[in-house]
Image: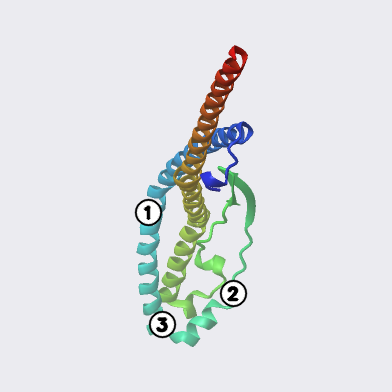
Amino acid sequence: MSAAQLAPTRMSLLRARRRLERVRRGTALLRRKREALVREFFRLAQPAADARGAIDERAARAYEALLEALAVHGGGGLATIGAPPRELLLDVRPGQVWGLAVSEIVAPPRLVRTLAARGTAPGPTGPAAAAAAERFEELLQLLLEAAPREALIRRLGDALAQTSRQLNTLEWRVAPELETQITATRRALDEREREEHLRLRHLRRTAGRTSAG
């Protein structure tokens, strides 16, 4: 709504002022929310970066061991050793952080197992396949532990971007438009009041001359 569209009445001026006050309160709330989101984001940033570094290092070791196991057993041999596939059950609990829906893994299971726990025979398996299995289990453990934090960081980033857009809209578009409307309406009312004052003075002078005549 532009200043020309706002009716030059005192009621319109009052409504625009009230709306501007609400916009200013909303801007202050959004600014505090953005600051809180930034603090939470940076609190998680360093642990997430450390976890990603550890995951990269474990992944490199795991795939190096996998190449060695493939060289010894071949793809078909590893598939046979790895059968049957392992089933993992996770207890996931929903929660909220700064109003954002998040999920938390309750008591993550221990994924790294001994050779006996895997149920594979030591002889046919061999050290190369056992090492590859152990390193991939270590990698999966890290990924499982990092997943909730990574999901939270993504949600925080999305919320931070949305809050910044809302704040910019209020600060740079809505509030200036309202201020322009208020200024234009106040000037129109002042001009109307001056014209009314001049009209009354003219009527008084006219009435005075009529009375004197």
Q: Which mark is residue 70?
A: 3
Q: Alpha-carbon neighbours of circle 1 within 10 Å: few (<14), some, or many (≥20)?
A: few
**What amino acid is found at the position of numbered circle 3 in the picture?**
Leu
Q: In the picture provided, is 102 more to the left or to the right than 71?
A: right
Mark positioned earlier in the residue sequence (2 or 1): 1
Q: Alpha-carbon neighbours of circle 3 within 10 Å: few (<14), some, or many (≥20)?
A: some
How many labels sit on residues? 3
Dot 3: element: helix
Mark positioned earlier in the residue sequence (2 or 3): 3
Instruction: Tell me the distance, in whole angstroms, between the alpha carbons under discs 2 and 3.
Output: 18 Å
Q: Alpha-carbon neighbours of circle 2 within 10 Å: few (<14), some, or many (≥20)?
A: few
Locate residue 92: give its quadrant. bottom right
Mark positioned earlier in the residue sequence (1 or 3): 1
Q: Which mark is residue 198?
A: none
Q: Position of residue 30 (x, y in %)?
A: 51, 40
Q: Position of residue 190 (x, y in %)?
A: 51, 29
Where, quadrant-wise, is the C terminus in this rendering? top right
Point 49% across, 87% down: residue: 76
**What amino acid is found at the position of numbered circle 1 in the picture?**
Ala
